[in-house]
Image (spheres, rainbow, N blue to C red):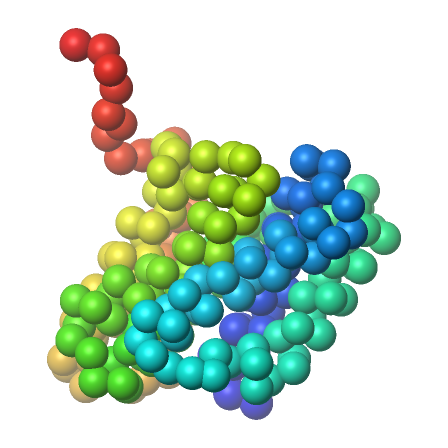
Amino acid sequence: MDVIYFFDLLGTFVFAISGTLSAANKKLDLFGAMFAAFITALGGGTIRDCVLGSTPVVWVTDMWYLTLITVAVVFTFVFKKHIMGLKKTLFFFDTVGIGVFTIIGLEKSLGLGFNPAVAVMMGVVSAVFGGVLRDTFVNDIPLIFRKEIYATACIFGALLYLLLSLFNIDRNVNIILTVLVIIAIRLVAIKFKLSLPRITSKN
């Protein structure tokens, strides 16, 4: 199994748990939880593939994605109390997930012949738009529009990947370094409460 495919599946599973927890916090029923899990895990990749004209989208042809989402929903409902106590672990895997999803979107866009600027945008879409859809669905302000460094970490990671590619760095090494940088930016931003400047209505 390709390493990035493994982490893609792992990210899908963790993102689905995140979506299920959001649904549970809003007291949605099982269908609502399944929908929230699905759009969180696959929303970004689906938007990316539709924008790029790459169809059918990956989860239509690979049933592992839908299977993992279903398992994640059931797992979360059964072990919700235990999962809530693993917030730091889930945060770490979520951060790994956005790193991997960024590279998947970036590589797919470049492979289809799109220019690097579009590829960076599609990398970010892959990583964060599932969360945007989830938060919109449960009536929350999406995380990327709030105080946390989130999409910005993906942008820096994508740019680093492109930069290292210019020096013919081995693909696997490039992926590992890029994902580690995205993780590091997220962890440092959370630890030191770093954020982008906010627009306020005050003078």
Give the left or right position of residue 162, taking residue 102 as reference: left
Figure disc tally: 0
Within the image, what quadrant is residue 165 found in?
bottom left
Within the image, what quadrant is residue 149 found in?
top left
Give the left or right position of residue 145, taking residue 167 as reference: right
Residue closer to the observer: 136 or 166: 136
Q: Which percent across, then down, holds residue 34?
A: 70, 57
Q: Which percent across, then down, holds residue 148?
A: 39, 38
Residue at the bottom extreme? 1
Q: Residue at x 20, y 78 (%)?
A: 114
Q: Which percent across, then down, holds residue 151?
A: 34, 50
Residue closer to the observer: 137 or 112: 137
Camera sees residue 25: yes
| Above-or-below relation of 167 to 141 | below
Q: Which percent across, then down, holds residue 11?
A: 55, 65
Quadrant of the rendering where the C terminus is positioned? top left
Give the left or right position of residue 117, taking residue 125 as reference: left
| Above-or-below relation of 106 to 2 | above
Camera sees residue 17: no
Q: Residue at x 49, y 62 (%)?
A: 43
Quadrant of the rendering where the N terminus is positioned? bottom right
Q: Residue at x 36, y 38 (%)?
A: 145
| Above-or-below relation of 165 to 33 | below
Residue closer to the observer: 147 or 39: 39
Residue at the right extreme? 78
Q: Residue at x 42, y 55 (%)?
A: 129
